[in-house]
Image (cartoon, helix red, strand yellow):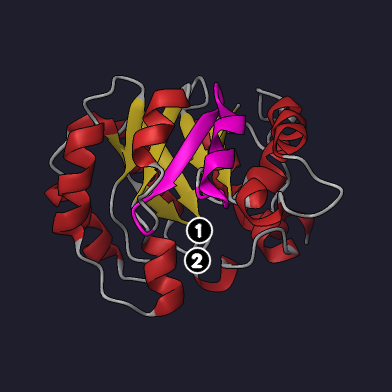
Amino acid sequence: MIHYHCADINPHHRLTELAGRHLLVSHAYPAPAAISHQIGQSVLLDNGAYSVWKSNREAHWENYYTWCDHYLNCPTTWAIIPDIIDGPVEDQDRLIKEWPFGQKGAPVWHLNEPIDRLLSLTNDWSKVCLGSAGEFATIATNRWHLRMQKAFNALAKSHQRMPWIHGLRMQGVGHLFPFASVDSSDIARHQSRPQNTILGMAERWDRAQPNFKWTIKPEQGELL
């Protein structure tokens, strides 16, 4: 499992301590994009939908496309296709159809959407992101875990081998599921605490790896 660490480190010069790691740069905070491509092993471009949702701002996806167009020239860089957290499925599908860069992007399946949509996306795309939304917006609650188990049960039944699934903001629970990659802002947010160092945090996260094979779990209805 690849851990993508948020590159929005302050002070900015300390980002170099993550040299050789996998880095995430959000379009909401794009300043580290250039240096991340100089020092990062690979880079994930985040569409900034979470920041848009939290701040109730309007998204300007044309600007995101222009930004991506430059950095997607790097072979190891990929991007998250625009999505609308808590938005209708019709709008999610429209944004996927408008995405101009093909498989250099990954669509988002939100946990409050139908499982069939997740399976459809994994059939059409080489990477799919999982995002917490709706009644499953809070990560690691019992309800959230049950929904994740249902999703991975369906994936395991539908695919001979687990497809590339990326967990958005799911680094803390990444070891529990067979993710290909996860991301987190933990280092960016907490590296200034006295007990933490950027390198030490990165090493701890990067060592956290899941069991790569998913065993079908009993679902809530079966337990009842």
Question: Where residue 56 sits in the image (x, y, percent)?
Answer: 37, 80
Instruction: Bin the neighbour count of mark 1 within 10 Å (Cα to Cα): few under 14, some 14-19, many 20 and up.
Output: many
Question: Where residue 122 sits in the image (x, y, percent)?
Answer: 37, 35
Apparent side of residue 201 relative to residue 91 in the rendered image (left or right): right
Question: Where residue 179 sits in the image (x, y, percent)?
Answer: 58, 33
Res 114 seen here:
yes
Above or below, 90 against 173 in this view is below
Apparent side of residue 38 relative to residue 212 in the rendered image (left or right): left
Measuring 33% from the left and 32% from the top, which residue is drawn there? Answer: 78
Disc ID at residue 143: none
Residues 113 and 7: in front is: 7
- Identify the magenta region: 8-28
Q: Which amino acid does label 2 sit on?
A: Ala
Apparent side of residue 113 relative to residue 81 in the rendered image (left or right): right
Measuring 48% from the left and 21% from the top, which residue is drawn there? Answer: 41
Circle 1/circle 2 CB separation < 8 Å: yes
**Quick one: quadrant of the C terminus?**
bottom right
Question: Where residue 154 sits in the image (x, y, percent)?
Answer: 53, 41
Q: What residue type is labelled 1?
A: Leu
Disc ID at residue 133: 2
Residues 144 and 72: in front is: 72
Residues 49 and 187: in front is: 187
Which residue was labeled with disc 1?
A: 111
Measuring 21% from the left and 45% from the top, which residue is drawn there? Answer: 67
